[in-house]
Image (spheres, grey):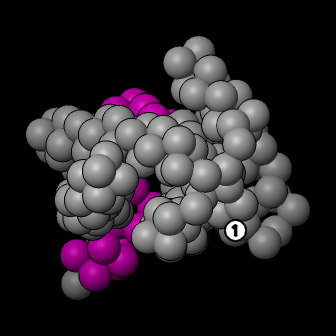
Amino acid sequence: GQANSAPAAMGQQQSQADRQYIQQALALGTVSLQQSNFALTKAQNPRVKQFAEFEVGEQNLLAEIMHSFADPNATASTTRGAQAAASTAPELPAKDAQAMERLSKAAGGAAFDKDYVALQIQGHQELLKLQEDYLKQGSGNRETTNVAKLARGQIQEHLTMLQDMQKELGR
C-alpha cells in the first residue's frame, strides 16, 4: 500500500524548529564535550573522571547523530560527513567560551572537580530545557522527536548523578 511506500518518513522534511533544535543541541553538546575532555586529564575524584568519560562518549555519539540529521547523506566517517560536521559546528556563547577558557587553564584537583560538576549541572539543565521545549512544540519529525525523548531521560539521570557528586564534593 501507499503507506508503506514512504518508509516511515525517513526523508522527512525538517522544519525550521527541527533545524534550530539540532543546532542548539550541537552547541550545548559541544560545550559539555569540551568540558569533559578537560576533566579526563584534570579531574581528581574517580566519580568525576568516570562521568567525564561517559559524557565524552555520549556527546560524540549525539553529535554524530545530529550531524546526520543536518546532512542525511553523510556519515561522520566520510569526507562529506566531516565537512558537514565542520559546517554545522556551533559558535559558543560568550559565557560558555569563558567557562571553557577557565577550565582549560585550571589546575587539576578538587577545585577543578567542583567547577566542572557545577558547569555540567548548568549545561545539563540547559540541555533538559532544550529537549522539553522542543517536545512541547510537537514537531512532526519522528526521528528528532525520538532523539529528544531519549536525551531527556539521559539528561535527567545525569543531573541526579551530578547533584549527588556536587554534594559529595562540597563536604
Residue at (30, 73) in percent of width and height: 8
Residue 51 spot, x, y in % from top left: 46, 67
Residue at (67, 55) in percent of width and height: 42
User: In the image, is residue 17 above or below residue 84?
Assistant: above
Q: Which residues are magenta?
A: 3-24
Q: Residues within 10 Å of mark 1 (few under 14, many from 20)?
A: some
Between residue 99 and residue 126, name the one nearer to us.
99
Helix, strand or loop status at disc 1: loop
Residue 171 spot, x, y in % from top left: 29, 50
* Viewer can see residue 70: no
Magenta stretch contains residue 130: no
Residue denoted by label 1: 75
Between residue 152 and residue 44, name the one nearer to us.
44
Residue 86: which quarter of the image? top right
Magenta stretch contains residue 5: yes
Residue 113 spot, x, y in % from top left: 51, 50
